[in-house]
Image (cartoon, rainbow, N blue to C red):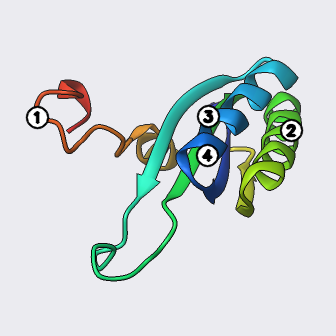
Amino acid sequence: MNEAIGIIEMFGFVSAITAADAAAKAADVKIIAIDSNKPANAESVEVPLIMAVKVQGEVSAVEAAVEAAAKAAESVSGLINKHVIARPTDDAVKMANRISVGRDKVGHIPNNA
């Protein structure tokens, strides 16, 4: 059975790093990905960068980590959403492990293209 997955979505890179730090300190979880979401028309409109921090571990640890990360993100720039998947499917785990940060640099993440 797969370990639980927690996802915390927020505005800004600094918030994402702060949230990941809070999650890792709050519980025994692994940070499995930090994602950015740049809308297609982001060059023409002012939009904040949307980030997601993804953690994995035992259900209770993931719940504690998500709460700590959400509180940290809210204090920096604002929380968008948070969610815990207690029993993710193999496909959900595969999608959670995909990351977008660094994809704009050729060869930066060769195993995650």
Give the residue number, with chain letter if any, for mark 3.
17
For the residue marked with disc 1, what is the amino acid? Val
The answer to which image quadrant residue 29 occupies is: top right
Q: Nearer the viewer, residue 71 or 76?
A: 76
In this rendering, the label closer to the viewer, 4 or 1: 1
- What mark, if any, has residue 68 been given in the picture? 2
Give the residue number, with chain letter if any, for mark 1.
106
Examine the rendered structure and indicate whether residue 25 appears above or below residue 81.
Answer: above
Q: Are marks 4 and 1 in contact (CB under 8 Å)?
A: no
Q: Are marks 4 and 3 in contact (CB under 8 Å)?
A: no
Label 2 or label 4, whichever comes before in sequence order: 2
Horizontal and vertical percent position of residue 1: 63, 31
Residue 27 visible here: no
Give the residue number, with chain letter if any, for mark 4.
88
Give the tally of numbered discs.
Answer: 4
Label 4 or label 3, whichever comes before in sequence order: 3
- Disc 3 crowd rating (10 Å Cα; few below 14, some 14-19, many 20+) is some
Distance between the alpha carbons at the discs numbered 1 and 2: 34 Å
For the residue marked with disc 4, what is the amino acid? Pro
For the residue marked with disc 3, what is the amino acid? Ile
SS of the residue under disc 3: helix
- Disc 1 crowd rating (10 Å Cα; few below 14, some 14-19, many 20+) is few
